[in-house]
Amino acid sequence: MNAPRPSLAGARWAQRLPDETFSSIEALLDESRARKQAGQVWPVDLRGLQAIPLDDGVSLVLDGTHLQPTPLAASQLSQRVGLPVQAVQVLSPELGAAALNERIAATASSGYPSNQPLRLLVEPQPDRGFTLRAVNSHRYARVWDADVIEALVAPLAEDGWQPARVEGRVTQAPVGLFRSDRDLFCFLVHPGPEYRLPGAHGRPLQRGIVVRNSEVGGIALRVRAFWFDGWCTNHMVFGGRTAFDFAVQHREGNQTPLARLQERWDAAGGAQALADETDIAAGQMHRAAARLLTPWADTPMATAHLAADAFGDFALRVGVRRSLPRRLLRMGAFSALAYAGPDDPGLTLWHMACGITQAVQGRTGHQDERMAVDEAVGRVLAAA
């Protein structure tokens, strides 16, 4: 991550299922409270778990109770017993269950820390048994998403902070509220006038805060505050500077992880730390936004072709042209037209960066290729 660029996430954010996006903080909080109420934490001995084969894969049994693990829970259990999760996935259900039972028995007999109780997070299924959401150690301190929203996100909303939305002419763009079986992601912005540096597009810098958490051990509890110019649909932020970035591991201690994070948040001034900035390094934001790729041509198609050629020239100079084939640049240029308002004099590097990252999301099934494109676009912006 470039120092002046508080990037948030890669292309995976744009691949969230529709039922994992939320239109309001209230809806997200209601869903999180319901999940917290349904969740049950069971301290169990590893030796009490037994894998059984089913027609569609491997399940678990604990004292006669069926547990259907999520992909993350299956991965956590496999890692704990030293068995690659891919091995269970590629084997037949019978062989996968046998391999997992063998490793459970071997690990349970090896002593500490294997003889310490595990903490299973389960939810009852409507038909039978339970869904196993997480397999955590005895030292894991769970922080519920609902508590994080109530303690950090809801107070910000009361002070005027709103879920971020992509600007421009992009239709049906998601807001910055996501929740999955693994983690929580809240991206909030403040529309107020307390800014000190006008942006290159004639609009001021925005203030942003990202709150992240995982109830199941996927990521740390984290809050990040920053100034920025814009963001695209896969949650990459362009132009700006980070004010603070606090992360707390989910580990037991004298205080809960949420209390430890709130202490650091309050010591830094919270959201107020973003209200009085007077010395923002504009650098990349001004260069990327002010360098016009081309004035508007007679037709959108002509504009897109000229912008694709211009961005390709920048990529060639930076040495990342191979990661940005011409077909992708043209698709990105057409997507970039949606980000540029009708009053803009032309497509900028920032518009093209947003368009390319959006275009690559639906055109390739390879995560490595998407990440290579994101890195190439970032290098072009940094060198602008």
Image (cartoon, helix red, strand yellow):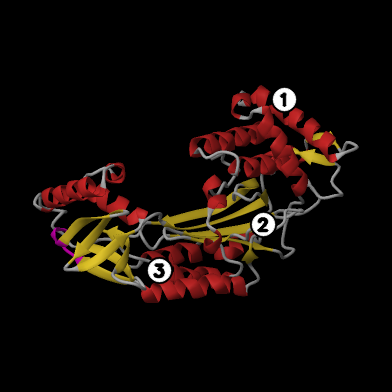
Q: Nearer the viewer, residue 316 or 173?
A: 173
Q: Give the CA distance from mark 3 to mark 2.
A: 27 Å
> Are dots 3 and 1 in contact, CB under 8 Å?
no
Q: Mark 1 or mark 2: name the one nearer the start of the chain.
A: 2
Q: Give the CA distance from mark 3 to mark 1.
A: 48 Å
> Are dots 3 and 2 in contact, CB under 8 Å?
no
Specify the label residue 313 is tagged with: 1
Prevailing secondary structure class for the magenta stretch in the rendered image:
helix
Location of residue 13 in the rendering, given as x and y in whole percent from the top left corner: 54, 51
Location of residue 329 in the rendering, given as x and y in whole percent from the top left corner: 69, 33
Location of residue 282 in the rendering, given as x and y in whole percent from the top left corner: 69, 44
Amino acid type, label 2: Ala
147 in relation to 318, above or below: below
Q: Give the CA distance from mark 1 to mark 2.
A: 30 Å
Range of magenta residues? 44-48
Amino acid type, label 3: Trp
- Image quadrant where residue 354 sits: top right
323 in relation to 262, above or below: above
Location of residue 103 in the rendering, given as x and y in whole percent from the top left corner: 16, 47
- Image quadrant where residue 11 sits: top right
In front: mark 3 or mark 2?
A: 2
Q: Residue at x 52, y 62 (%)?
A: 20
Specify the label residue 144 is tagged with: 3
Q: Residue at x 52, y 48 (%)?
A: 12
